[in-house]
Each structure stands twice: as structure tokens, then as C-alpha cells.
Image: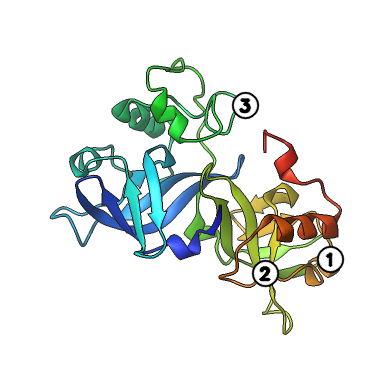
Amino acid sequence: MLRSLKELVNFKVRASDGDIGSVRDFFFDDARWVVRYLVADTKSFWQEPHDVLISPISFREADWVTREFHLALTVDKVKKSPRITDHKPVSRQFEQEYSRYYGWPYYWGTDGIWGQWQYPAELAANSEFNLPEDTGSDDPHLRSIGEVEGYHILALDEEIGHVDDFIVDDETWTIRYLVVDTRNWWPGKKVLLAPLWVDQISWAENNVTVSVPREAIRNSPEWEPGQPVNREYETRLYDYYGRPVYWTDPKR
């Protein structure tokens, strides 16, 4: 199912034997457009609070009624996990240490979005499968969702709005759409753009360049927050832009 990441912020994070904290942010891979980690704020639950990273490999489910995020991990396991360093990007070295701590295969080094697999839970089910140490020494393309929210959207010909949210598949944790708010430019609306239509993200200039004309975005099908993004809406959106749909390609 497709979900809003913004709606998940402040959900309580529950381990199998107790509370850990609350959802503060997510890190996503800007090369593959996949959420790699949930950032949990533990300050209200631990005596020595610090942010911890939780991989979708350990996700069970998000309860939208009780606003709780359930994990297949114990509190103690999370407490002893490798710590991220404030104000520094997540390095590949950290990810290698993190994966070894939990006994999970690396997700990088292959063509799949989750290593050899399509779904993150499959890495936990294949914990005996380990990729060689030299499968990737390059740093990951991990960015904060909270940081990118508010970035300006630059169409082919002119600025059009800003990033307001992200719509994610809650099984693969692939980001399917950026939610663009156009109301700063005219009495506008919120519309969806697929990451495949993004040309580049400029972290220095805080903007996202897309391969779509401004007028096309302005007249595209409106999306109302809180409404489900179903296959009927998606088909209409892709038909409007004349782009091939992602669900016919298993690599997307």
C-alpha cells in the first residue's frame, strides 16, 4: 500500500518487548529512491537518549489507528546497535558495521533494491547469505526526508512549488512519489511527481530539478492529503504525463 511518510512522523516505535521512542525522520537512498532507515528519537524513553537507525529489514507493521510502528527487534538489541554521529552523513563503513551487528546481508552491491531481493524482510530471512566485504566501499546516497521537505521544485522552464511530502510503498519501502505543493505560486494544489522524472537534486541550492514543464505540473491531476493513492489515480497520472507505468517493470 502507498503511504505518506509525513504521516508516520511521531508514530511511537515499539520493539517486541517495549517502547523505543518515536519516529523523527527517515533516510532515503537518492540513487534508488528507497527508504533505508527510520530515525527513532529515544529521548523520552531511555536514560541516555540518542537517535537510533532502524532498517526496514526489521519492520513488522505500522498501525495507523494507534499510531505505532512495530519492530521485530528487542529493546536491548536496538540499544546496543551502532550509533550514528550527529551532523555527519551515514557512511558505508557504518552500514557494514550495522549489518554485521544484526547479522543481515548487505543491501548494496547488486542490481536489486534490497540486495538480491525485492523486499527488505527477505534479507532477514536470508541472514546466512553474506556478500563479500568488497561489494561496495563507496559512500551511500543517503539523505534525510526532513531535510528535503521544503526544497524548491524546478520544472523544465520555471520554478513551480516545493517538496511537501513523500509517498512510499510500505512493503518495499520504495518512494513512489514526491508530493509537490504549488500554492506559493498561485491558488494552487498539491500534485504528485514520480522520482523517475527527477533529473537531479541540488543539496547546495536546496532544489529538485524535474524533466516536466511547469504548465504540465500546474494542470496535472490534483492529490488531496489523506486520500489513498490507488491504481486508478496512478494510471490517470501516468496517462496524463504520457509516461510508462512503473508496475510493469519488476526492477522499479
Q: Amino acid at mark 2?
A: Trp
Task: Name the image quarter holding residue 236.
Answer: bottom right
Q: Earlier in the sequence, mark 1 or mark 2?
A: 1
Q: Which residue is mark 1?
A: 216
Q: Nearer the viewer, mark 2 or mark 3?
A: 2
Q: Which residue is mark 2?
A: 223
The answer to whether residue 164 is seen in the rendering is: yes
| Camera-nearest residue between 252 and 202 | 252
> Helix, strand, or loop for circle 3?
loop
Left or right, residue 62 beside residue 52: right
Q: Amino acid at mark 3?
A: Asp
Instruction: Give x and y (percent) for residue 10.
Output: 36, 64
Q: Identify the residue at image location x=60%, y=63%.
A: 228
Q: Which residue is mark 3?
A: 111
Above or below, 202 relative to 163: above
> Helix, strand, or loop for circle 1?
helix
The answer to whether residue 86 is seen in the rendering is: no
